[in-house]
Amino acid sequence: MPEMDAILVYDIGTTGLKCAAFSLSGVELRSATSTYRTFYPEVGRAEQDAEDFWTAAVEATGRVLSGGAVKRARILTIGLSGHMNGCLPVDGEGRPLCREIIHSDSRSVAECADILRTVPHETVYALTGNRVDEHLSLPKILWIKKNRPDLYRKTAFFLNSKDWLRGRLTGLGGQTDYSDASLVCAMDLRAGAWSRTLLKEVGLDPAKFPEIRPSAEFCGGLSREAARALGLAEGLPVVFGGGDAACATRGAGVTDTSSAYANIGSSAWISTLAEGPVMDPAMRMQNFCDLDGRKCNVCGTVQSAGIAVDWALSLISGDRAAMDEAVSSVPPGSDGILFAPYLMGERTPHWDANARGCFVGLSLYHGRAALIRAVYEGVAFALRDVFGIYRELGMSPCGLTLLGGGARSPVWRGIVAEVLGRPVLPHASPTNATCLGAAMAAGTGAGVWRSLDEAALIAKTMPEETPDPGRAAVYDRLYPIYSCLYERMKPIFDELALIRSF
């Protein structure tokens, strides 16, 4: 097999770091994932140790370079992606001062209220394209200032995961890209800069917020120390990289609002790419920057998706592959069970940290397969909530590509198509789309492609899956019932939240 030029990518996920090498035609040459722990010190809290990202990067790189499929000398550049909405305080040398507060953490509900007592919600949304929410970075930073003031004073910069790893690779810190910056909830989306006015109004020091650069821009070369640890060439070009959702958009081949994608990973979301922010009067949808810093992702997020399935399987000691086969024998509607997937609160459309998951309709008749199918269907119904908002905002993407680990399940793919009542396009490599988008940014920075739109042409999908009309009709009858669940349960969610606070 002839040697090929390659782009190396690091993608920091919720459960592990993936290192992948791609050819210039977008073919994965080799990949490896190294897992790490997520800490849940209290209800609603979720943290990760940034040093685990580095340990995972070293281990996964060694596995990718073993076997000879990827030649060190043919690696052109390094790209980066990572989970968004985080809060990692670092000192002036880039050293982590505590574990990163990650996207699913919801400890900062009180800080959201503090922000909104100072600045009207509509003002924040109009400025940033995002509502104030405990899952975003801004209230997490305020939580640190209020609850750990010594840590706040010591912090030089608040970063996201991939920005810290890039600093470890290059020795250069204090920088981020437009996609991650735009989901802090403190960036003026139209100006492409931190809103110093907003930060000062809520009592934060703008100097603690990193410089913002385009994702495809060259950041620096691989440092000697990092090169030795990774077994790579010193000086290898590293680009700024992007947040995972922004990378996934490009990896899905999305370039405008004619298409969209649904990612079903630990969380799930649907996103399309507009020329600028698309404001939702009800503030249900998020807007965040594309990798180029100019276009805008318009996105709705389901907080718990694949992680809800993992949770359910862990309780019933089920194997995912075996359970998929059992689930396929359960009729649509799970024999009368509905599941609300609000295990860690919910974002779009409810934006409610108090919301919690629930099964409705259980009986002694139901078995494990019906429960798991109900979880699959609950996530699909939540995605239908998101897709309905696109229609309200005047957007109707024709194509919908499926990404993420959930897209590998034929059963779940079929359920999503039937619940949404539309054909779906499984990505040819559904768990690699985020890494592929990061590779597109790195390759564009290295001159492999003239633009991100040109790079997006290398994304490939499998044949279209069309919904069965009869099964889709069942879901059309069930969806209005599902839609009532949240409003009916909200008073109970709020009462339970008071109990949890005792």
Image (cartoon, rainbow, N blue to C red):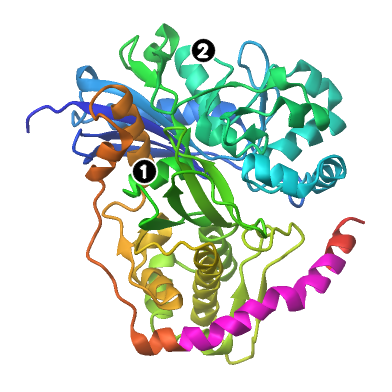
Task: State which mark lies toward you, 1 or 2.
Answer: 1
Q: Residue furthest bottom?
A: 365
The magenta stretch is 474-495
Q: Is residue 253 above or below residue 482?
A: above
The reply to whether residue 106 is in sight is: no
Which residue is denoted by mark 1 in the rendering?
250
Crowd band around label 1 with a 10 angstrom C-alpha radius: few (<14), some (14–19), many (20+): many
Residue, x 76% and y 52% (percent of image)?
43
Residue, x 43% and y 66% (percent of image)?
320
Determine whether, in the image, residue 419 is placed left or right of residue 27.
right
Q: Residue furthest right?
A: 502
> How far apart in space, not on screen, are marks 1 and 2 (Cα)?
26 Å
Determine whether, in the image, residue 298 is placed left or right of residue 486.
left
Q: Nearer the viewer, residue 497 or 464?
A: 464
Crowd band around label 2 with a 10 angstrom C-alpha radius: few (<14), some (14–19), many (20+): some
Q: Is residue 108 above or below residue 176?
A: below
Q: Residue 478 colored magenta?
A: yes
The quarter of the picture where the C terminus appears is bottom right
Rendered location of residue 6, percent (x, y): 23, 28
Amino acid carrying label 1: it is Arg
Q: Residue furthest top?
A: 224
Dots 1 and 2: beta carbons under 8 Å?
no
Rendered location of residue 21, percent (x, y): 28, 33
Rendered location of residue 331, percent (x, y): 44, 88
The quarter of the picture where the N terminus appears is top left
Q: Main secondary structure of the magenta part?
A: helix
Q: Nearer the viewer, residue 275 or 319?
A: 275
Picture disc at residue 172: 2
Q: Residue 407 colored magenta?
A: no
Rendered location of residue 230, percent (x, y): 38, 19
Amino acid carrying label 2: it is Leu
